[in-house]
Amino acid sequence: MIARQIEIVKSIKEVQQETGTKEPRENLVTQSFWRSCRAGDPGMDMIVKEGLELEFTPTEDGQVEAVTIRLNATWRGVLQRAIERWA
């Protein structure tokens, strides 16, 4: 059996550039912003609806410099079954 943990790490700057968000950097570096995204709060639920999970580790001053994005358990299962089928 092949087990894979596919994830990407993006800096806040990369998130801004690659998503085209108009959200100010001051908001994107806050833990509360990313907690809301991770929890799928109303208006912040796109990431969860797309089947992704978020992790972040705040710096000593409490800011978020980067986020880790990976498939949620459901999609990891789908990927694993596909890998096993084609192996």
Image: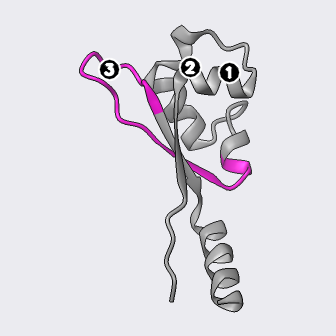
Residue under label 2, please give it: 13
**Residue 64 figure quarter:** top left
70 lies above or below 73: above
Identify the secondary structure beneath mark 1.
Answer: helix
Instruction: Identify the amino acid type marked 1.
Output: Gln
- Residue 16 magenta-drawn? no
Q: Residues within 10 Å of mark 2 (few under 14, many from 20)?
A: few
Instruction: Identify the amino acid type marked 2.
Output: Lys
Horizontally, residue 46 falls left or right of residue 84, namely right
- Bounds of the magenta segment: 48-66
Q: Say which of 67 and 84 sits in front.
A: 84
- Residue 51 magenta-drawn? yes
Q: Are marks 1 and 2 in contact (CB under 8 Å)?
A: yes
Identify the secondary structure beneath mark 2.
Answer: helix
Label drawn at residue 17: 1
Residue 70 horizontal/vertical position (percent): 56, 53
**Residue 28 figure quarter:** top right
61 lies above or below 34: above
Label drawn at residue 62: 3
x 64%, y 69%: residue: 74
Q: CA distance from mark 1 to mark 2?
A: 6 Å
Identify the secondary structure beneath mark 3.
Answer: loop
Of the two numbered discs 3 and 1 in the rendering, the one whose residue sits closer to the viewer: 1
Residue 22 horizontal/vertical position (percent): 73, 13
x 46%, y 19%: residue: 30
Quadrant placement of the C terminus? bottom right
